Every structure is written in C-alpha cells, then in structure tokens.
Image: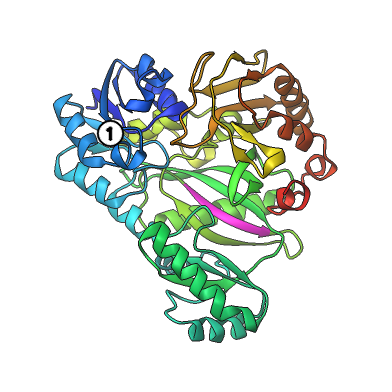
Amino acid sequence: MIETILVANRGEIAVRIIRAAQELGIKAIAVFSEADRDALFVKYADQAICIGPAPAKESYLFYQNILAATLSAKADAIHPGYGFLAENPLFAEACRALNINFIGPHPLAIRKMGDKATAKKMMRQAGVPVVPGSPGIIHTAGEALTFAEQIGYPVVLKATAGGGGKGMRIVNEESEIENAFAAAANEAQQAFADSGLYIEKFIPNPKHIEIQLLGDKHGHLVHLFERDCSLQRRYQKLLEEAPCPILSDDLRLRMGQAAVQAAQAVKYDSVGTVEFIFDQESQQFYFIEMNTRIQVEHPVTEQITGIDLIKNQIQVADGKKLDFAQKDIQKTGHAIECRINAEDYQNNFLPDTGTISQYIVPGGPGVRVDSGVFPGYAIPPYYDSMLAKLIVWGNDRRQAIATMKRALREFIISGVKTTIPFHQQVLGSEAFLRGSYTTNYIQDFFL
C-alpha cells in the first residue's frame, strides 16, 4: 500500500498531485530547488526537501538527489508529474531497482514510446493509422530524398527522440533536403544527445487531437474521449478543449478504438495519451506519438467525464483495479482550458519574469483554476512560463466559451505580462467560434 508519495516536480502540477494524495489519505512530500524555497507547492506539502540549486539539471533533473530524498524520507512512491523525469525510462528503472513505486507506466512502455521511429513501427504492426513515411531511422540525406520521392512533398524531418518542435524541419522541394537534414540532425543532437531522424508526409493544416487513456495492472484499458489541442505556438499548446468541436460520433469512436489498440501494443498500465493529427479535408487521422505521463491539459477531460485522473493514476500504480469499464464512461458538456503564461504575446510570446504584485483568480459556477503562484511570488527565470491553468465547464460549447470569457475578465495578474489578452482575442475569433482552427492558427494570426 502506498502511504507516502514524493512529488518529483514543481509548480501547479505539484500542487495538484499533493492535493490528490492528501485526499486519498496519503502523505505528500515535496522536493524543491533553491529557487522554489517559498513556492506554493512547498507550503502545501506535508514535508519538503531541498534537492539542489535553481537550474533544473542540478535539481529537478538530477534524479540521484531525488532518489536519495525518497529513501531518506522513507517514501513508498514517486509521482513525476509531467516534463522533467516523467518520461525518462532510466529514472523509472532506477525507482524499480530501489523498490520505489514509480507512478507511471512500466519502463519498457516509456522506452518503446519514447523513440518515435520505434513507436510508429509498432503502431503500423498494431493496425493503427500512421502518417506515410520511413519505417524507421534514416541515416543520410540521400535516404531522406528517396523516401520524399516516394511519399511526395511536402515532407517533414523529425528527431526520433524529439519533442517541442526541436530537430524538426519541413521540406517543400528536393533542393532543400540536404540542408534540412543536416540542420535537423544537428539540432536533435544538441537537444537530445541523439541525432536520429525519420521522415514522413507533412500534413499542412491539421488539427491536433489526443485521446486520454487509463490502464491498470490487471489488463483493463479504457479511453476517456478526446481533446482538441490545435491551438499551439512553436508546437507548444496554449488552449485545449474537450470534446473536439468538429468530430463526428463515428470518428470519435474510431479514434478512441485506435488509441486503445496503440496502448495495448505496449501493455499500457497507467495514465497516458495517444496523439493524432487530423486532416479535416480528407477526414483521415494519423498517429504521431504517445505521451506516457499525465498531460498539462488533463483537467478538461476530468471536467467532461467526472473522473479524477491523478487519483486513478495513483490507485492503479498501487495495484488497484479500475472500478469502471469503457461502457461506464460518459461525456457531459464541454470544457476549455487556457494556459495563463508569463509571456508577451505581442512580442513573439517572449517569456516575462518579475514579481506578481496582484493576483485575483476568477470563480463562480463552472470555473476551476490550477495554479502554483500567489501575490508577491517572484517568477524564477529557470523554468516554464506557465503561471496557471484556467479551466471552465459548460452544458455545451457556447456556454463554456461564455464562461471562459467572463473568467478571463475576472482574472487579474499584475507585475508581469501574461497571455490573458491573447486568449480574449482568440475566444472572439471566427475560426475559434466555428471550431475549425488548426495548428497554424497562431502562426497565421499572431506571429
């Protein structure tokens, strides 16, 4: 039985995990860098341990210190949150070797899905739709050229160990292949210490739709419908909603089934997400990757299903069976999440730092705020720029949009620039109101 969880993360997700653990009657231990000594998650935890200096590589990514803290505090389990060590198979394996319960999938699933070329090969074998491209890693620009000629331009080169758009290059014609291959491989090596690339057909104006999954250690696996995560800048999401406003019931069913097939291929046993791109013109969807962790945008799924994903993630890690089946999961209403970041959206979304002088959160029916900041909080320059997640729920999408507009007006943050004005513009735009916006929306209108 899990009695004590060490939370190997920071900010709002650490607060979220601490609250869930405490509601389950589990002691929650925070670890923090010197820059986070006065952070909210540190104050909420039952115990807090400093694990190093401000830079993440010397604290939140330095897993030897995190493991040492876990052992010294006699914690039974580690919850990695998202980012940092959440998808690091070496960390998960180290936890297992020390008899520490890693609250996430088994290490082999992380390893298999972490290599995107391997993951795509497995998905083809499992019968999951995959974007046409190379069956594995390509080693030369010549190989890239051969595949590009087979699948047709435009194509995209991607880092097999990648994420966040690093090690990625779009190629529109043959003359660009050689330079694009060299640039992508170099960037991948710098970012991930792995220069491996694969190539696939580029879908120029897609939606980004992901399916939430939940599995236990007894072979039960369900999906909790989809989220539309198409509103992105530089491949980083800014707004998510559930369900997707333009999916038919048939497509929703087929996507959910495909996601479950994908997860079954690696015997998935935790919370995870299968991501697809969806071509509105052809009505075809394609697997792009699986995230073997909780996602930033998980609250919108919780709002439409009534299922607490963090609590369930902890319970299945503790060996408990899911107490519901696929037929029991219903979606009700519509939910939207706006990521409130300390960024200047009028200046290419440049991160902003400083001290928050005023912080007034919205409330009322259908409003939820997941946050890790407070008035007087000094934003450290070392980490992600997200201050809070503003989540709303409505009986339908129109009501959810109206509630979000009202909540954004109520949300007051002074001392730093934020993305609140950006979200207010988006919610009034025709493309968003129609639900037809794609991953190019921000690039086309804001950058």
Residue 119 seen in this snapshot: no
Comparing 57 with 334, the one in front is: 57
Comparing 118 with 325, the one in front is: 118
For the point 44% across and 39% down, which residue is it? Answer: 294
For the point 24% across and 35% down, which residue is it? Answer: 66
Could you tell me residue 319's position as x and y percent? 27, 36
For the stretch drawn in magenta, what is the main secondary structure? Answer: strand
Could you tell me residue 97's position as x and y percent? 15, 45
**Bounds of the magenta segment:** 273-278
In the image, 292: left or right of 246? left
Q: Is residue 16 magenta?
A: no
- Colour approach in the figure: rainbow
- Identify whether 78 is placed above or below 180: above
How many numbered circles are shown? 1
Q: Is residue 275 magenta?
A: yes
Residue 152 seen in this snapshot: yes
Task: Please identify the quarter of the rendering in which residue 409 is found.
Answer: top right
In the image, 333: left or right of 3? right
Instruction: Kindly identify which residue carries mark 1.
Output: 78
For the point 54% across and 30% down, which residue is it? Answer: 353
Comparing 384 with 27, the one in front is: 384
Could you tell me residue 241's position as x and y percent? 65, 38
Q: Quadrant of the N terminus?
A: top left
For the point 20% across and 40% down, which residue is it? Answer: 64
**Which amino acid type corresponds to the residue marked 1 in the rendered image?**
Ile
Could you tell me residue 124's position as x and y percent? 48, 70
- Identify whether 122 is placed above or below 331: below
